[in-house]
Image (spheres, rainbow, N blue to C red):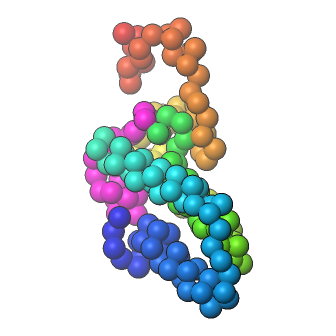
């Protein structure tokens, strides 16, 4: 996680929880444990997917800093095209549930819109960079809601290589 106010991860996982925490203290609302598992799962998804992508895609740690060298279609990216952004949203949803804060709820709504716009920009750049390979990936992998890949289809075909050959 880059420690910069312009970094989305710094805002999501550090700044917004601090701001909501101050709001909690000032409003004298107690924090509920309800959303804490979502916060932990969201942060874990962000970190694990990021480490997985960075070690396989090459390039900088984020799309805002440059383009990946390789398209990653395995690991968490086999289930959803945006596991890191999903982790942000899951974390913020947990924050809203735990705090019952109108501010935190507003942050979830704002980030839903922001990430939707960001994904459209990222997808455009990835289509330009990877062409048909990215189109194929989009056709079989959902943008947001994780879905288990069709295991039977994988078993029927046997191993597949990036150029379409069977192994």
Residue 112, can we see it? no
Residue 116, can we see it? yes
Using the image as rendered, state which of residue 13 and residue 26 is in the foreground: 26
Residue 42 x %, y %: 52, 55
Identify the residue at image location x=45%, y=10%. Answer: 158
Identify the residue at image location x=67%, y=88%. Answer: 27
Residue 95's quadrant in the figure?
bottom right
What secondary structure is the magenta-colored segment mainly? Answer: loop
Identify the residue at image location x=49%, y=34%. Answer: 78
Residue 71's quadrant in the figure?
top left
Using the image as rendered, state which of residue 26 and residue 66 is in the foreground: 26
Residue 29 x %, y %: 68, 81
Q: Is residue 164 left or right of residue 41?
A: left
Q: Residue furthest bottom?
A: 26
Residue 84 x %, y %: 48, 53
Looking at the rendering, the stretch of residues picked out in magenta corresponds to 57-75
Q: Is residue 107 above or below residue 165?
A: below
For the N terminus, the quadrant is: bottom left
Residue 39's quadrant in the figure?
bottom right
């Amino acid at each position: 996680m880059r420690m910069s106010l312009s970094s989305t991860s710094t805002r999501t996982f550090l700044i917004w929880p601090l701001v909501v925490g101050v709001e909690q203290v000032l409003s004298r609302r107690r924090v509920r444990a309800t959303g804490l598992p979502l916060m932990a799962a969201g942060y874990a998804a962000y970190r694990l997917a990021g480490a997985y992508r960075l070690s396989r895609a090459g390039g900088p740690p984020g799309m805002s800093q440059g383009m990946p060298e390789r398209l990653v279609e395995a690991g968490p990216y086999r289930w959803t095209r945006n596991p890191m952004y999903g982790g942000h949203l899951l974390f913020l949803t947990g924050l809203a549930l735990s705090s019952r804060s109108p501010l935190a709820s507003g942050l979830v709504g704002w980030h839903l819109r922001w990430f939707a716009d960001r994904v459209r920009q990222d997808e455009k750049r990835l289509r330009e960079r990877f062409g048909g390979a990215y189109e194929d990936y989009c056709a079989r992998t959902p943008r947001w809601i994780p879905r288990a890949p069709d295991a039977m289809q994988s078993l029927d075909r046997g191993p597949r290589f990036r150029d379409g050959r069977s192994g």
